[in-house]
Image (cartoon, grey):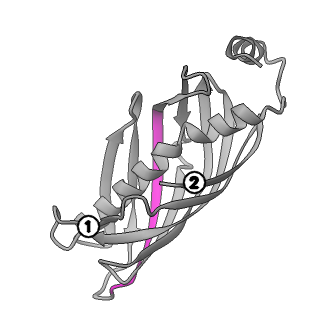
Amino acid sequence: MTRTLLTLCLAASACHGLQNDADARYAYLGLDDGVQRALGLGLQGFSLASSANIDAQQADGDAGGTMVVTGQVDQGASDNKELRLDVALVDYQDAVPDDNDDAILTVYNTDTTAPLALDLSLRNIPDGTLTGTLTGLAIASDDLAGDVVFDLAIAGAIEADPDVTDGVRMVAGSTHVTGTATSDYGTYDVDVTR
């Protein structure tokens, strides 16, 4: 299906439920960089937190919109921590090239009462591991439209952040994301390492 035909189908609401493996994949890829951004904001908030509450950490999408991460972290002196984070998307957009290097622009929003849930478990801080999940529903529009339900598992390594006292960050290239992104186009099986 060409991008033009896809747009016409969406505009006419005549292709609802059409299964398309490529567009199921793009429905996830539009937020692939966003998963890394959410992890970075969550760890930044953890590193800067002075209480159980993590102050709002915000970043722009590469092509527009914003992502805001808030939540809570376990307190105490343990080198193991649990983070319960909310990821709110407002017109969030990253440019993703399709197989012909044409940009696919998908805009994601979350309901104001139902952000994505990012739950993380940090072990052996600062030089240890991170595991967690990113789940919930985002509303997509623009080139791809409809609900996208994310059910992702995340695993990776963490290290001390030299720019933040007692801070941690992801080890580059260590983040393994698996799971599914389900939309009207089908279910995309996610298995990426970043």
Residue at 78% in and 12% down: 12
Residue at 57% in and 49% down: 114
**Where is residue 108 drawn, in percent x and y?**
54, 35
Residue at 40% in and 49% down: 37
Q: Is residue 141 above or below residue 92?
A: above
Q: Is residue 110 above or below residue 20?
A: below
Identify the magenta region.
79-92
Determine which quarter of the picture holds residue 15. top right
Label 1 sits on what residue type?
Ser
Q: Is residue 13 magenta?
A: no
Q: Position of 188 compared to 39: left or right?
A: right
Outermost residue, front direction?
100
Q: Mark 1 or mark 2: which comes first in sequence? A: 1
Question: Secondary structure under badge 2?
Answer: strand
Q: 28 or 111, which lies in front?
A: 28
**Where is residue 109 drawn, in percent x and y?**
53, 36
Determine which quarter of the picture holds residue 73. bottom left
**Where is residue 6 drawn, in percent x and y?**
73, 18
Magenta: predominant secondary structure element? strand
The residue indicated by pointer 1 is: 47
Q: How far is the residue under mark 1 from the one under mark 2?
A: 26 Å
- Please indicate, yes or no, whether residue 184 appears anywhere in the rendered image: no
Residue at 23% in and 64% down: 48
Label placed on residue 192: 2
